Amino acid sequence: MANHAQIAPFSWGDVSLSQAVHVNGIPHATKIAIGEWLEYSFPRESINKILERNPYLEAFSVEVNLTSTDGKNYDTTVYHPMGFLLIVMESGQPKAQAAKVAIAAFVWHFCGGQDIAAKDAIQLRQVLLKTLAALQSCHCAFSQRILLDQVRDVCRQLRQPIPDLSLIGKDPKQTALEGF
């Protein structure tokens, strides 16, 4: 069991939870908070039913000691963000269904499921070349990090590997071509 914890609201993007506890710097949600977010009429009871049907979800929880409004301490189970997400995935609520679609779209996008139009690919390659040229002449560490992030982002959008940045600025004759 984790030590005595402070309960507080937590928000990130579209997720606003009425009750969360930070455990090792990671926000963990209570059953009530998850059930409220999913818009159940009986939040705790509804989440308990999901947990009864899916005992594997308990692996994503931890017990913490909380002080309630009556001043008494209670051991309370809270759920890691992975547990929160898995509980949402097991729910049939409309909000859960929308979250499932959003997650599927996210996975589809990052697994290469979204085609890039030829015109967009050409523009992205032009941005990549300009960014690499700027990186070659940049001597500011802060600016280099921003440019490197832009290179990574463009390569991700193009679904291609990040180029070997150690070759930037070198004459092709300076690099040995292996295997040729």
Image (cartoon, rainbow, N blue to C red):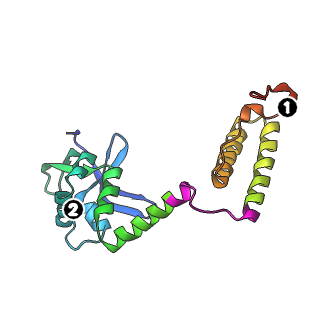
Q: Is residue 107 visible?
A: yes
Residue 114 image position (x, y, % from top left) = 59, 62
Q: Secondary structure at mark 2?
A: helix
Measure how far apart labels 1 and 2 are at the Cα level.
61 Å
Residue highlighted by disc 1:
172
Residue highlighted by disc 2:
50
Q: Is residue 171 visible?
A: no
Residue 93 image position (x, y, % from top left) = 30, 72
Q: Is residue 14 left or right of residue 48?
A: right
Q: Is residue 98 left or right of residue 146?
A: left
Q: Nearer the viewer, residue 66 or 56?
A: 56
Residue depicted at x 16% and y 58%: 52
Looking at marks 1 and 2 on the same chain, the residue that comes earlier in the sequence is marked by 2
- Looking at the picture, does residue 89 appear above or below residue 28? below
Q: Which residue type does callout 1 highlight?
A: Pro
Q: Secondary structure at mark 1?
A: helix
Q: Which residues are magenta?
A: 108-120
Residue 123 falls in which quadrant of the image?
bottom right
Residue 84 image position (x, y, % from top left) = 32, 56
Residue 138 falls in which quadrant of the image?
top right
Residue depicted at x 83% and y 33%: 169
Residue 57 image position (x, y, % from top left) = 25, 52
Q: Which mark is residue 53?
A: none
Q: Badge 1: how crowded within 10 Å, few (<14), some, or many (20+)? A: few
